[in-house]
Image (spheres, rainbow, N blue to C red):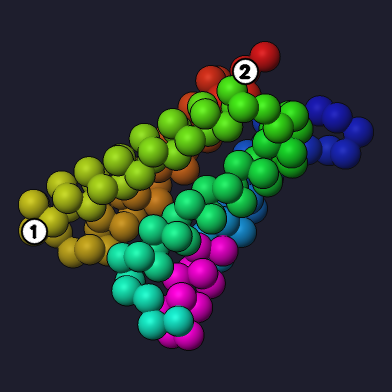
Amino acid sequence: MNPGGIAPGLRRFTRFAVSGATSTGVHVAITATLVSMFDATPVAANGVAFVSATLCSYLLNTLWSFSSRLHHHTLRRFAGVSLLGLALTVAIAWIAQWLGASYWAGLAGVVLTVPVFTYLLHRTWTYRD
């Protein structure tokens, strides 16, 4: 334990969760703004919001969660992990739909799986020394 009383791994994961919640808020705000104020299609708005939220997430996680430096190799790795997370999200939602489960079941699967998956990949690959 450190003097602050929280294990470094738990602190990093907590920061990762806060960064994810913040990035999700950015995504929602951009999508809602583009659709309601600029008459963008939901698909276009979500595309812009996904890119913006991913950049927000990269900055927060690099500088705060993992206390790393901004660098092109971490950006490429981060983008790759984000795309894997997106693919996993779509796969879980598709499987839930294929099984005839409610979208809530698919959403629960996404929420319980994707953040842990992306955290572990970021910790072991994106931000490895």
Label 2 crowd (10 A; few <14 / some 14-19 / many >=20): few
In the depicted structure, whether residue 17 falls above or below residue 122:
below
Quick one: label 1 or label 2, which is nearer the N terminus?
A: 1
Asked whether residue 97 is drawn in magenta, I would say: no
Q: Residue at x 36, y 35 (%)?
A: 84
Q: Residue at x 45, y 55 (%)?
A: 50
Report the residue that reaches farthest toward the right. Answer: 3
The picture places residue 44, in percent across and down from the top left corner, at: 35, 65
Nearer to us in this view, 49 or 118 = 49
Segment colored magenta:
26-37
Residue 129's mark? Answer: none
Query: Nearer the observer, disc 1 or disc 2?
Result: 2
State yes or no: discs 1 and 2 in contact (Cβ < 8 Å).
no
- CA gap between label 1 and label 2 equals 40 Å
Nearer to us in this view, 91 or 1 = 91
The picture places residue 46, in percent across and down from the top left corner, at: 39, 63
Quarter that holds the C terminus? top right
Q: Which residue is mark 1?
A: 100
Q: Residue at x 45, y 60 (%)?
A: 48
Q: Main secondary structure of the magenta part?
A: helix
In the shown orientation, is residue 45 left or right of residue 87?
A: right
Nearer to us in this view, 10 or 97 = 97
The picture places residue 110, in percent across and down from the top left corner, at: 34, 49
> Dividing the picture into quarters, in which one does residue 40 lie?
bottom left
Quarter that holds the N terminus? top right
Looking at the rendered structure, the kind of residue marked 2 is Arg
Residue 43 visible in the shown view? yes
Label 1 crowd (10 A; few <14 / some 14-19 / many >=20): few
